[in-house]
Image (spheres, grey):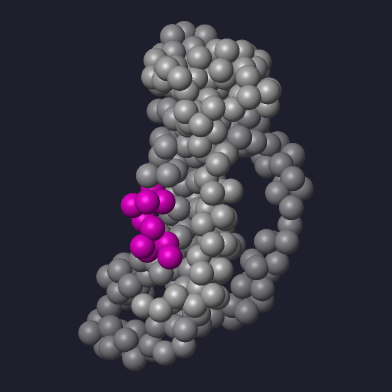
Amino acid sequence: MRLTRSKIFAFACLVAGSIVMIFPFWWMVVTSLSTPAEASASASASGFNWWPSDAQWSNYPDALRRMGSKPWIGFLDALTNTVVITTLVVIGQVFSCSLVGYAFARLRFRGRGVAFGLMVATMMLPVQVTLIPMFIMFRSFGWIDTMLPLVVPAFFGAPFYIFMFRQFFSQVPESLIEAARIDGCSHVRIWVQIMLPICKPVIAITTIFTFIFAWNDFMGPLIYLQSEEQMTLAVALNSFQNQYGDFRDAHYLMAASIVTMIPCIILFLVAQKQFVSGLSLGAVKG
C-alpha cells in the first residue's frame, strides 16, 4: 500500500494524540509502583522517571489494606457495594429504557408526541436542580443510608438512553412487527424475542455508559450513604485521598485509583466491537 503525505501526516497525528492520552495513565502506573521518595518527586513535578528503579508491587495491597478504618474490610465493603449498585443500575437502565423506547416507537396512543417531547426536554434540566427535592422525597421514604435511592431511579429510565432505543426501534421494518403480530405475538413478546436481540449495539452503549457513570458516581453515594459500611469505591477513594493526599503518599493514592479503574477498562475492551458499531448507527444509510 502506497503511503501518501496525507496518510503519513494523519498517522503521525494519531500517534501523537495517543501518546498525549496515554501519558496520564502511564504516569499513574509509574507513580503507583514507585518508592515514597520517587512518588513524591514525581507528584511535585521535580522529577519523573519513565519506570521506577525498583518497582514496589506491594504498594497495591498496602493501599487497599489502608482504605477504611479496618484493614481490608473497608475496601471489600466498598467493592461489594459498588458492584451491587452498578449491576442493578445497569439492569434497570437497559430494562426500562428499552421498554419505554419500544413503546414510543411502536405503540400508537394519544399524546405520544407530547409525552416524548416532554421527556426529551428533561435532558436540558440540570441534575443539581433535582437534588434537594429528591433527597427530601427519599428521606420521607426512609431510604437514606440505603442503596435504594441509587438503584430505584434507574428502573424508571433515562431520557438519553430512551431516545437512543426509540430511534433504533423506529428503524426496524414495520413488516417484521406485523408478521410477529399475525403469528400471535404480544408487544411484550415482540420486545423480548425480536427487538432486544437485534439492538445489541444500543444495549452495549447503554451498558458501558451506565456502568462507568454508576461505578464512578460520587455525588449520589456521598448524599444518600452515610455509614462507612455503605460506602462505594468513589466515596472510599475520596476519603483515602483526604487521608493520603500528601506527596509522600502519592504511590498509595495512585495504586488505589488504578484498582478502581480496572473494571471500566476491562468492560470497554470486552464490549469494544459492539460499542463502536453502536456509535456508527445511522451514519450510513442502507
| Residue shown at the point (55%, 41%) measured from the top left | 23
Question: Does residue 246 appear anywhere in the picture?
Answer: yes
| Residue shown at the point (74%, 52%) measured from the top left | 126
Residue range corresponding to the magenta coloring: 267-276
Q: Report x, y in % for residue 185.
A: 27, 78
Which residue sits furthest right?
129
| Residue shown at the point (59%, 77%) measured from the top left | 112
Question: Does residue 239 appear anywhere in the picture?
Answer: no
Give the position of the N terminus as an image quadrant.
Answer: bottom left
Q: Is residue 222 above or below residue 278?
A: above
Q: Quadrant of residue 205?
A: bottom left
Between 183 and 132, the residue placed more toward the observer is 132
Between 185 and 97, the residue placed more toward the observer is 97
Between 139 and 49, the residue placed more toward the observer is 49
| Residue shown at the point (54%, 49%) measured from the top left | 19
Q: Is residue 133 above or below residue 36?
A: below
Total marks shown come to 0
Q: Would you say 138 lies left or right of 56 here?
A: right
Q: Quadrant of residue 223?
A: top right
Q: Would you say 256 lies left or right of 123 here?
A: left
